[in-house]
Image (cartoon, grey):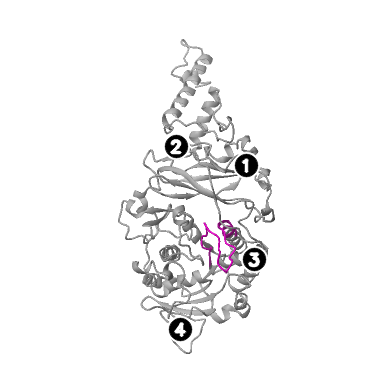
Amino acid sequence: MVGNADHSLMCRPGRLSVRRCNRVAFIVLIALIVLLMTTLSPPQNKEPPHPPHPYAGDSGKPASPFPNSWIDENKSRLQLWFSRPDYYRCADLPVLPEFWTLEEATSPAFVDIPRTRAIEVGETVCVRVVVPARAPRASMLYTPFPGMPWDSVMLDLVGNKTGISVPVQLRPTPDHRNAMRDSVHVYEADVLLRDVDVYRPQGMVEYRDAEWNPEDGLPTVSYDPEPLLISDLMEVEVADQFGRSPYSMERYMELPLCTDTSPEGRWVQASDLPFNTTALPAPDHNGRIWMPYKCRLQQYSYPDFAKCLLRKYPLMHFYGDSNMRRMLKKLTTLGEWCGQPESHTTHSCMCEDHGEPFDRFNVDHHEILIDIDPVRGGRRPSATNFTASIPPPNKSRIYFRRWGGLTARNPMPWPRSFEAGVQHYFGTPQLVLLSLTNWDSAFSTRTYFASQLDQLVTHMQSSYGPEIEIIVRTGQYYCCRTDLTGAKRQYSRLRNKGFDKYITDVLTERLGVTRKISIWDVSALMESQSLDVRGTPPFCDSNHARSEILEVENQLLFNHMCN
């Protein structure tokens, strides 16, 4: 229109001047854009006022990203329209200055959701936890791992209707005061919500002052969590206004099959699902099914998985502890071990199988060979004369090196198999499976473990070529108690998480450049269970997963290996 009056429908000689006409047209265009943004932007519930924290004074209000002027108001509308998922991120919502002055004597730890208005599925909400300053005490001796918080705060967002529990992965806000032991600590997370519901926080402060990390001979601190103060207004509504959510239960069976060993997901009540669930992995002991968000888990029978091994993985090397032993019991019996509902409440299936009779392989040996076929399952090699490095016809073979992590408690030092030439004696596998954390977090210091992990990486690089796939199994999830047995395990939820992260970071960085490496995150399965499930006795001293959870862990692995 500008500079081309001859072709304009409005700006012709005899009506308005071209300059004045263009000005009017520009104003009309801006008005239309504002009207379009107002009309098309998904309608929101009126945002409730930010509830003032009772210990923060009258100014406990969030900093609003909507200025008062008309121009800035509409600028914010445009920002919201073109970048909705980022709009409520913690980085855009300042921490209230009053929070940094709070003390334990006058304020409990509390949850703060700066903006609680309704959001669409697939958007994030900023969640914060404020832990007031604490007076000096004996725990000054405890220190966190590098980059980890002083306080162990466990928090979930839980759906009121569905019961879906979303773990909140809190991190310290980028403020130098969070690095100081005697300061207020403020933690935050941008929580991605993908299921329609109204979510409320649930959680607790498990430990303060790094008492979650009993390193260097310090005693384990008894588990005595503090409740978090959570206002009734701290809730977030998630809607699927246009009915197009890719995470809808109605669309789950349309998803591609899972190939990732650690797909994000949630536990859903089987009775709430709008389709037949027989093609999915079985529910847990609470009737809930693990459902990834972006892919579909299919139920593999153990004979079918054994056929897959023959085709794709005729030779495998496994390194692991008693959790791996329980997995192999399921595999070698083709799912019969703890496979019947009446067996699920036995002590072996719920917790500890050590010492029970088992004839498929010698569970007490440190180096074990297991031959697997789809009909008979898995057994020790039957021939008297055989070559350990070559699987027999129509069978796949697993070399299982049983260890207690990389600790000094192994009767047979863990490096010995590598030093003796594991490939020379037991062949070149298609896959290597490593299980760590469980013993290491319980009995090693972080410094000692770091030196041992460095040795393991060196041995892996020299023993296994880049064509061999590596799967790293995380430790079992741990929470809600202290080990009071004679074993004196140094377990805590945050300590185990710290070991897992260190292991996966080091192995991915040093081995993942030239090799295919996957993380089999069994810890995430239990972390996504409700707090009631995680925190309800009886607890298992050895921290084994129940057989129903073990089955879901196995199905994650089977789908990755065979889909």
Q: Describe the element under mark 1 as helix, strand or loop.
A: loop
Q: Give the residue number, with chain letter if any, for mark 3.
A: 449
Please report whichever mark, 3 or 2, sits nearer to the chain's N-terminal start.
2
Distance from disc 4 to disc 2, alpha carbons, whole Å, reads: 61 Å
**Sooner in the amino-acid sequence: mark 1 or mark 4:** 1
Q: Are marks 4 and 2 in contact (CB under 8 Å)?
A: no
User: What's under tag 4, amino acid-wise?
Assistant: Pro
In the current view of this chain or complex, which residue is farthest to the bottom? 384
Mark closest to the chain's N terminus, 2 or 1: 1
Q: Which residue is mark 2?
A: 118
Q: Residue furthest top?
A: 14
Where residue 466 appears, x then y in whole percent? 57, 68
Magenta highlight on residue 229: no
Q: Front-most of 458 and 136?
A: 136
Three-letter code, disc 2: Ala
Residue placed under numbered mark 1 in the picture: 105
Provide the residue span drawn in magenta: 470-498
